[in-house]
Structures are given as C-alpha cells and as structure tokens.
Image (tube, rainbow, N blue to C red):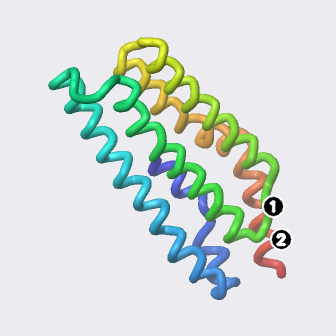
Amino acid sequence: MWWTYFMLPSGEVLHVHRERGFIWGYGQMFVFGAIIATGAGLHVAALSLEEPGHISGLGAVLSVALPVGLYVLSVLALWSLLLGTVDPFHVWIAIGMLVVLAAAVLLAASGAGMPVCLLVVAASLLVPVIGYELLGHRHTAEALRRATAE
C-alpha cells in the first residue's frame, strides 16, 4: 500500500496547479480511511483465526479485501483528478487488481483457508506496483508533462 501511494506525483502537480489542492486534501480522507479499515479488517481476520466461529472465513476475507480495493481505487482516482486525465492503462491496472481481489473472495467462498485468501488479497497490491514499474511510470511522466505544461 505504501508503494502504491507514492505513485502519485502530488508535489509536482500541486506546485503548478494549486487549485487541485482541495481535491487532493479531501481525497486523502478516502485513502486514509481505507488504510484504517484495512487494519481493522486484519484485526477481524486475526480474531477469526484465534476464535473460529464468530465470523466466517468469507466475512473475514471481505473485511480486508473491500478496504484494500477502496484504497487502490482511491489512489487511482486521486491520480486522475490530480493530472486531469483518465489514463486507460490505469483503468486496466484497477481492473486487474479487482480481479485478483475477486479471486480471493471466491476462494474464501469455496472454502479455501483464510491465510491463503489473505495472501491473494496481498498479491492484489502487486498488480499496481508491477504495472507502474513496467509501464505506468512512463504514462505518469507523460501525463505529468501535459499537466504541468498547461
């Protein structure tokens, strides 16, 4: 999650477009709220391992997967709002990440162990990181060039 957050070229854009600071600042509420909810979901998952029966494995996995999905979607939405463009590459990154999260939920629904499902949830965060490292940094550099030239 840390790595994904710093894909945002916040400083460069806000230096040129100070009017986007309002969107950036209030957008942080969604980002930080999702981080907090992820921590709470991990607590629920840990408690369900410690005392099985209070919540199903599916419920525990959902309590982590939903906030992780909200987190990455919030970061990608902030990217689009800051740079003033919707990059199709980032849309594909979001879809790929959501597919991996859905796979974790389907695994939990089919009875797979919660630790395995949580590893798949964690692997979903690799989708934006790998995508950014392979191609996304070029898209961001080009969008940043356009945004700062306006």
Secondary structure type for disc 2: helix
**Figure quadrant of residue 13:** bottom right
Task: Give me the residue at 32% from left, 24% from top.
Answer: 56
* Residues at marks 1 and 2, CA–CA distance in whole angstroms: 6 Å
**Camera-nearest residue between 92 and 102:** 102
Crowd class of label 1 (few under 14; some 14 to 19; many from 20; radius 10 Å): few
Crowd class of label 2 (few under 14; some 14 to 19; many from 20; radius 10 Å): few
Task: Give me the residue at 57% from left, 82% from top.
Answer: 22
Residue extending farthest left:
51
Task: Please state which amino acid type lies under the numbered disc 2.
Answer: Arg
Q: Are marks 1 and 2 in contact (CB under 8 Å)?
A: yes
Task: Please state which amino acid type lies under the numbered disc 1.
Answer: Glu
Residue 89 image position (x, y, % from top left)? 78, 46
**Camera-nearest residue between 114 and 89:** 114
Number of numbered markers: 2
50 left or right of 26? Answer: left
Residue 115 image position (x, y, % from top left)? 35, 21
Task: Give me the residue at 73% from left, 58% from top.
Answer: 140
Residue 71 image position (x, y, % from top left)? 51, 51
**Camera-nearest residue between 4 and 38:** 38
**Figure quadrant of residue 76:** bottom right
Residue 39, relative to residue 117: is it above or below?
below
Mark on residue 146?
A: 2
Q: Which residue is mark 1?
A: 142
**Camera-nearest residue between 109 and 138:** 109
Residue 16, relative to residue 104: is it above or below?
below
Residue 47, relative to residue 68: is it above or below?
above
Residue 110 image position (x, y, % from top left)? 48, 13
Position of the C terminus by quadrant: bottom right
